[in-house]
Image: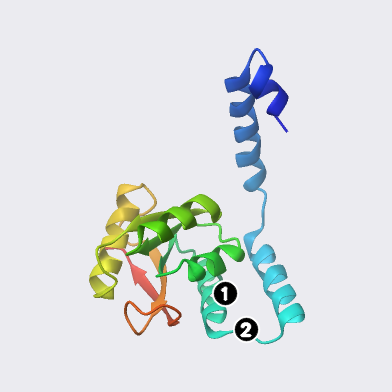
């Protein structure tokens, strides 16, 4: 949309700044609960019953909306769960934690609304989730008392095992 002005125009930086501000303002008008429900209904209509990971991801977004969570956390090996969560267009930021640099790069680069971080290991979900809340504070997303919704598998460090949703409160 701005390729002509940003490539050859006299005011490329200002043009991009105006477009970014316009996009941010437009996003404030979105009713995320309606977007979520429309997407969920479409998925069920087209695909039928959901697989476990998608059901958990969908439920995480709905729970986050319902409790006014300030952040979603996804622990993932492959990035698939992060894509499933982002598919439902949550209003709040999504922090993806993974042990794999490639997964972190792919999710942050290609999945809307996601910030990724590498962790040394996916073993020890309680400590990983604590670090996630600390990261959320550092990024300015969280303060004490805020709700956070987390998604991961009960089997740690196993790809394809997402089956758990947790609600945490920032200490």
Does the rendering let one see residue 59? Answer: yes
Q: Position of residue 75 (x, y in %)?
A: 38, 69
Q: Quadrant of residue 24?
A: top right
Q: Position of residue 129 (x, y in %)?
A: 30, 68
Location of residue 11 with respect to 101 vertically, above or below? above
**Residue 154 located left or right of residue 59:** left
Viewer-closest of 114 and 37: 114
Q: CA distance from mark 1 to mark 2?
A: 9 Å
Q: Quadrant of residue 90?
A: bottom right
Mark sitting on residue 98 = none
Furthest toward the front, the residue is: 102
Furthest toward the top, the residue is 10
Q: Residue at x 57, y 74 (%)?
A: 58
**Please, is residue 119 above or below residue 156 in the view?**
above
Residue 50 is labelled as 2
The reply to whether discs 1 and 2 touch (Cβ–Cβ < 8 Å) is yes
In the image, 113 versus 102, the foreground residue is 102
- Name the quadrant of the N terminus: top right
Q: Position of residue 156 (x, y in %)?
A: 32, 80
**Tag of residue 58:** 1
């Amino acid at each position: 949309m701005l390729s002509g002005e940003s490539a050859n125009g006299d005011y490329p930086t200002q043009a991009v700044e105006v477009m970014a501000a316009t996009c941010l303002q437009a996003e404030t008008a979105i009713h995320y609960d309606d977007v979520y429900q429309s997407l969920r209904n479409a998925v069920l209509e087209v695909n039928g019953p959901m697989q476990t990971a998608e059901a958990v991801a969908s439920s995480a977004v709905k729970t986050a909306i319902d409790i006014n969570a300030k952040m979603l956390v996804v622990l993932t090996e492959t990035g698939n769960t992060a894509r499933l969560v982002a598919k439902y267009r949550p209003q709040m930021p999504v922090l993806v934690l993974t042990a794999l640099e490639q997964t972190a790069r792919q999710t942050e680069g290609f999945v809307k609304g996601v910030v990724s971080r590498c962790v040394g290991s996916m073993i020890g979900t309680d400590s990983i989730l604590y670090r996630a809340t600390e990261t959320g504070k550092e990024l300015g997303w969280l303060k004490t008392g805020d709700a956070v919704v987390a998604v991961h598998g009960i089997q740690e460090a196993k790809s394809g095992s997402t089956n758990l949703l947790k609600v945490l409160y920032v200490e």
